[in-house]
Image (cartoon, grey):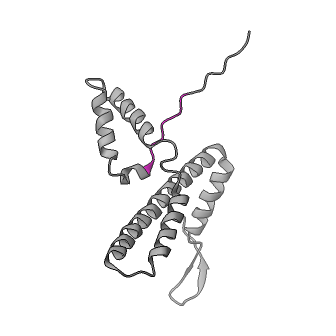
């Protein structure tokens, strides 16, 4: 009997950068209303699917190219000083700063996912970081009133 490959549905992952998009609220509202009189779970699923359609694909993964394009445009406009160019420069600079902020949010979310994934799978990896933090946050010696250092004699 021949096996047929059936692709799994892509799991929904909310991108934190979507919150910064102007039309995100409208997309969520549309997804909520699309579910009609369904249960809260159905409404959430509807929101998830419509958000995935709206924000999926390359929308949030093109930061590097968009940042480079903004830098290039800013360099072209930098030497000119007429009023229209100054306004255009200001708009592109604002776009550039927003892109940098979104890029930082994107990578923060990825780093957190990496940490959780590695921490779950590799107890030794997680334990090493936790132990190092505990060691750095502990006090093993104290100075007395005379300024002499002595080992901590009390349990904390």
- Name the one closer to the observer, 148 or 5: 5
The quarter holding residue 25 reads top left
State the residue lying farthest toward the right: 1
State the residue lying farthest toward the left: 37
SS majority, magenta: loop
Say above or below: 53 vs 4.
below
Name the residue: 48% across, 36% down. Answer: 12
Screen quadrant of the N terminus: top right
Q: Is 92 a magenta residue? A: no
Which stretch appears magenta?
Answer: 9-16
Name the residue: 31% across, 27% down. Answer: 35
Name the residue: 35% across, 80% down. Answer: 82
Residue 54, position in %: x, y? 41, 40
Asked whether residue 56 is in view, the answer is: yes
Say above or below: 31 vs 90.
above
The quarter holding residue 152 reads bottom right
104 sits to left or right of 83: right
Say above or below: 1 vs 83.
above
Residue 73, position in %: x, y? 48, 69
- Name the one closer to the observer, 70 or 109: 70
122 sits to left or right of 57: right
Name the residue: 63% across, 48% down. Answer: 118
- Name the one closer to the observer, 99 or 10: 99
Residue 76, position in %: x, y? 48, 74
Asked whether residue 156 is in view, the answer is: no
């Amino acid at each position: 009997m021949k096996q047929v490959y059936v692709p799994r549905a892509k799991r929904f992952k909310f991108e934190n950068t979507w919150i910064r998009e102007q039309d995100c609220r409208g997309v969520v509202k549309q997804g909520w209303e699309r579910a009609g009189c369904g249960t809260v779970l159905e409404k959430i699923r509807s929101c998830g699917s419509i958000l995935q359609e709206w924000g999926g694909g390359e929308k949030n993964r093109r930061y590097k190219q968009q940042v480079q394009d903004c830098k290039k445009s800013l360099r072209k406009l930098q030497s000119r000083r007429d009023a229209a160019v100054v306004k255009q420069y200001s708009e592109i600079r604002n776009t550039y700063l927003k892109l940098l902020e979104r890029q930082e949010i994107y990578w923060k979310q990825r780093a957190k996912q990496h940490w959780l994934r590695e921490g779950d799978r590799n107890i030794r990896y997680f334990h090493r970081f936790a132990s190092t933090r505990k060691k750095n946050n502990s006090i093993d010696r104290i100075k007395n009133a005379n300024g002499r250092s002595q080992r901590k004699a009390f349990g904390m």
